Every structure is written in C-alpha cells, then in structure tokens.
C-alpha cells in the first residue's frame, strides 16, 4: 500500500466518531470471558489438591500461576489467537509467567473495543511478578542475578588441582557439579574445598551441586573385559550376574540392576551408552536375555564399564534411592548447596528423599533441589514434582536430554524440551539445560555449527551445564559470550528489539552511480549492496 494511502487510512480511524465494534470483537470477547471462567474453575481445583504440599507461602502465587497455565493449555486456542491478533491484541502466546494478568488485560481491551461496561486493566506489577520471581530463584539457586548461569561438571583431578578449578571460576563458572556416581567421599570433599577456595580468591559466588547417583542401570562387568566393537546384527548376552551367566561365545554384559533384566520380555528395547548401541531382546535363556543389535555407528560401538543401559518404555518400578544414594547422603547433606535428584519420577520419591535427608541431617533446613527430568514418567508427573519440591524449598528442573532422548526418541525430545521450559516458566522455577552442550568444543577444542546454535537456544534457560573435558575453560568463556549476545535479542519466548548494527540504512541504498566507460562517456549502474 502506498505511504500516502496508509496515512489516509490511519487518520480515518482517528475521527473519534462512535464506531461499531470491529468485526470479530464481540465473538472474541465472548470466547475469552468463557475461557477465563473455565480456567479459574479448573485452576482452583488443581491448587486445592496441591495445597497440602505447599509449606512456603512465597511459592503459592507461582503454584497458582502454574495451575492457570495448565488449565489454559488444556484448550485449543488457535482460532482465538488468530481473532485476537487481527484486533491488534495479545494472542496469549507469551503468557507463561503471568497467565491471569494477560487474560484480564485482553478482556479489558475487548470491553473497550466492544463499547461495553469497562473492565479494569491489571496492575502492571502483575505482568512483571513472574519474571521477578524467576530471577530471584535463579539468584538463590545459582548465585546469578542476570543472564543464564554456567554449571560445570568437575573431573576427578579437580580434587587435587587447584589451578584447574581456579581457571573454571575465573572463566565464569557459577556452579560446580559433583557427580556422586563416581569417585568417593574424600574426593568429593576435596573438590568442595577447591571450589570454595577458588570462589573466595576471586570474590564471586560459586554454588556446589552434588548429584545423587540414582537407580541408573549401568554396565557393571564384562566378559571378555575388552570385547570387540559391536556391529548391527551382532548379539550379546545380558546377564543378571556375570558369574551366573550361561556359558557361550557371545560377549556377556552384567548390569547394576539385575532385577530389571529379569523383567525383560522378548522384543523389549535395550539401549546402551545413550543409544549409541541399540538392541532388542531376541530370546530368553534362563536368567539371561539374548540381545540382537539393531542400531550402531558404522564403525561399531564399544562396550565399556559404567556406561548407562536404558530400557525405553519398560515399566521400571525401582526404589527412588539406591544404596549408593543413601551412603552418599551424609556427605552431600554436609557439603552441597544444591542436591541433584537423579531419576526422580513421582512426588513420593521427593518425600522419600526428605525423610532420608532428615535422618542424615536431623533438624536441618531443606536443601534446594535440582530435579533431573530423565524419564517418561518424570515428564508425565512434572507439574506434581515441581509443586512437591518447590512447596518446601527452592527448586530447579534439569532437562537431562541424553536420557530423555533415549526414553522419548529424538523427535519427541525436540518438542518436550520446549514444553518443559514453558511449564517451568509458569511455575517460576529455573531450568538447567544439560547434556552435550558445546561437546566438540569441550572435548576437541573447536565448536561445531550445530552446537553453537544449541548454545544460543540454551540462553532461554536459567542455567546451562557443560560436561567435563580438556577444553572446559575455553568453553566457559565461549558460552558466556554467546549467552551475553543472545540475551540482547531474546528473553524466554519474547524477542527483544535492540538496535541492529548489521545493516546500517545508509549502506543499503540502491542509488545509481555514474561510472566512465572506455571511451569516456559516463554510464549509470546500480550500486551493489555491501
């Protein structure tokens, strides 16, 4: 449309005559008011069922907003969104942290468009309350006031190498992760001491997260100790115990959870090392399961001790705390700023952890939790897990994308990681973006293009986790720079609009420029875009 015509149309709308409601406004208002009422009813019912678990009054507004969001997302809002957008109103697409305030504001605007009894607009504070609470929780948990915090998994040498830990803290590590599935209590204590000293030297906080091992199934023993690479079509013997395995020529794998092997039926999937080796149970021989390999890299896969073993889709009714968890708890309760709860699946798992912590640390205040979302059951129960945990202490949720990819498949993971971000924002609960972030840079010294984009996407979380490797210090600096740049442009789902420096207007002209020809006569050509 020509510029003059656009100006004429704009001025026509400013003639302050008594216009009838714009087309679709009445229907949109009716649909929105019905939606708001339905959300209030369903939200009240949800919160009533949660109330007993909410001991922190400060968390109650966040729980209410989470209930509002869950009730909102039970509806298909696509048609209403299109109608609201056509009227120049919010289409509710970024309402995670302030659901009812967004609905009330749209209702107030529609009331004025339709000429009905005016509704009050919500207090502006209600729009910013969710973001403020989320920032506060990020600072409590990870010590970071602005931008995503950076968490780093410590290697065993961190216990005896103060320069290594010092380089991490100096580069920008906000939280040190100690994986209690490895090493021993004396090593964990030494790591904690190194981190505390380095943080004090640099005058900046650095939280300590201690991950409980959880009931994760791992390769416990192998026969032969170094089996050849596994190829598609090969078979292996999955045994409950190495000594009880039926003699055969197949490689034998014994795992840390023999009761799981006993429950596997023919056809059950068996994934090893985050799915790098994929198999299915082809036969049952006594207590053993014969597994045929159906997926592996072209060069084959290596069977190694301590590698994880997953059984996607299999119902695993395991106790939430293993013997190793219970043995680690006294040290964890003494040293950790945050506890990573591995393979948490049900609200009662959190209750069990609280009881175990109370026994290990009588009279102690609840320690902040990081709920590691690693299974399909945890995804299904996520709202209840968040309420159960955050109802009594500061809580974060970790998107453990390695195990989730195995459990859900990569296509579903791409979708579910977004849904977890939205749900946690509604609950005003920080998210940790984990698994293979900048993995090539950490291990090889150079980032791939794909993982650079992944790191940019990670900025939407409150914390980003790097794994251990020889180039972690460089990766911390690289990640901090990416997060800083992306924070200018994006806040959760909202695009920010700062000044763009890439395309100055004066450099974009296509104005003609005279250029002399060979015989001296000027010829006009278009100037190229630089």
Image: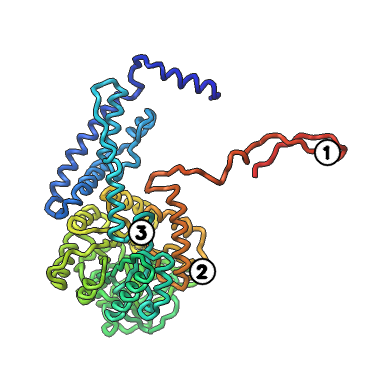
Q: Which mark is residue 445?
A: 2
Q: Residue 12 appears at what percent x and percent y?
A: 44, 17
| Sequence-wise first label, 3 or 1 | 3
Q: Residue 350 appears at what percent x and percent y?
A: 19, 62
Q: Which mark is residue 463?
A: 3
Q: Residue at x 46, y 73 (%)?
A: 470
Q: Residue at x 32, y 81 (%)?
A: 221
Q: Residue 427 appears at what percent x and percent y?
A: 25, 50
Is the residue 456 above or below the residue 294 in the image?
Answer: above
Element under label 1?
Answer: loop
Q: Nearer the viewer, residue 444 or 382?
A: 444
Element under label 3?
Answer: strand
Is the residue 136 above or below the residue 198 in the image?
Answer: above
Q: Nearer the viewer, residue 395 or 268?
A: 395
Residue at the far top: name it: 17
Element under label 2?
Answer: loop
């Amino acid at each position: 449309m020509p510029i003059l015509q656009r100006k004429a149309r704009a001025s026509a709308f400013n003639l302050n005559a008594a216009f009838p409601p714009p087309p679709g406004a009445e229907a949109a208002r009716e649909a929105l008011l019905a939606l708001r009422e339905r959300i209030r009813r369903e939200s009240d019912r949800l919160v009533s069922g949660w109330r007993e678990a909410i001991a922190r009054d400060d968390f109650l507004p966040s729980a209410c907003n989470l209930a509002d969001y869950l009730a909102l997302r039970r509806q298909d809002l696509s048609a209403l969104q299109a109608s609201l957008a056509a009227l120049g109103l919010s289409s509710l697409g970024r309402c995670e942290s302030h659901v009812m305030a967004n609905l009330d504001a749209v209702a107030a605007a529609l009331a004025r468009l339709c000429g009905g009894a005016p509704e009050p607009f919500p207090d502006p504070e209600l729009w910013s309350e969710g973001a403020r609470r989320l920032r506060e929780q990020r600072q409590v948990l990870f010590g970071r006031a602005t931008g995503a915090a950076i968490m780093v998994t410590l290697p065993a040498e961190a216990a005896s190498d103060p320069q290594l830990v010092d380089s991490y803290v100096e580069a920008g590590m906000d939280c040190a992760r100690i994986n209690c599935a490895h090493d021993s209590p004396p090593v964990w204590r030494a790591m904690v001491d190194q981190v505390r000293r380095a943080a004090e030297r640099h005058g900046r906080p650095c939280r300590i997260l201690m991950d409980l091992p959880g009931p994760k199934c791992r390769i416990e023993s192998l026969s032969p100790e170094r089996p050849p690479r596994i190829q598609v079509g090969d078979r292996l013997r999955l045994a409950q115990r190495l000594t009880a395995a039926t003699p055969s020529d197949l490689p034998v794998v014994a795992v840390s959870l023999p009761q799981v092997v006993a429950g596997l039926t023919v056809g059950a999937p068996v994934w090893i090392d985050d799915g790098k080796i994929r198999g299915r149970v082809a036969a049952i021989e006594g207590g053993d399961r014969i597994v045929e390999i159906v997926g592996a890299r072209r060069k084959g896969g290596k069977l190694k001790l301590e590698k994880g073993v997953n059984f996607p889709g299999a119902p695993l009714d395991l106790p939430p705390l293993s013997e190793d968890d219970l043995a680690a708890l006294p040290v964890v309760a003494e040293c950790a700023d945050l506890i990573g709860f591995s393979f948490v699946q049900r609200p009662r798992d959190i209750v069990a952890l609280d009881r175990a912590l109370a026994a290990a640390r009588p009279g102690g205040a609840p320690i902040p939790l990081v709920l590691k979302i690693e299974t399909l059951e945890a995804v299904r129960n996520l709202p209840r897990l968040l309420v159960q945990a955050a109802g009594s202490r500061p809580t974060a949720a970790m998107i453990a994308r390695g195990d989730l990819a195995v459990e859900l498949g990569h296509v579903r993971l791409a979708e579910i990681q977004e849904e977890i971000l939205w749900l946690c924002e509604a609950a005003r609960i920080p998210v940790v973006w984990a698994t293979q972030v900048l993995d090539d840079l950490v291990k090889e010294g150079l980032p791939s293009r794909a993982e650079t984009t992944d790191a940019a996407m990670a900025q939407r979380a409150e914390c980003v986790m790097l794994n251990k490797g020889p180039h972690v210090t460089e990766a911390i600096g690289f990640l901090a720079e990416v997060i800083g740049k992306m924070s200018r442009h994006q806040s959760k789902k909202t695009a920010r609009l700062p000044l763009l420096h890439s395309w100055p207007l004066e450099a974009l002209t296509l104005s003609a420029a005279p250029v002399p020809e060979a015989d001296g006569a000027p010829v006009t050509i278009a100037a190229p875009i630089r």
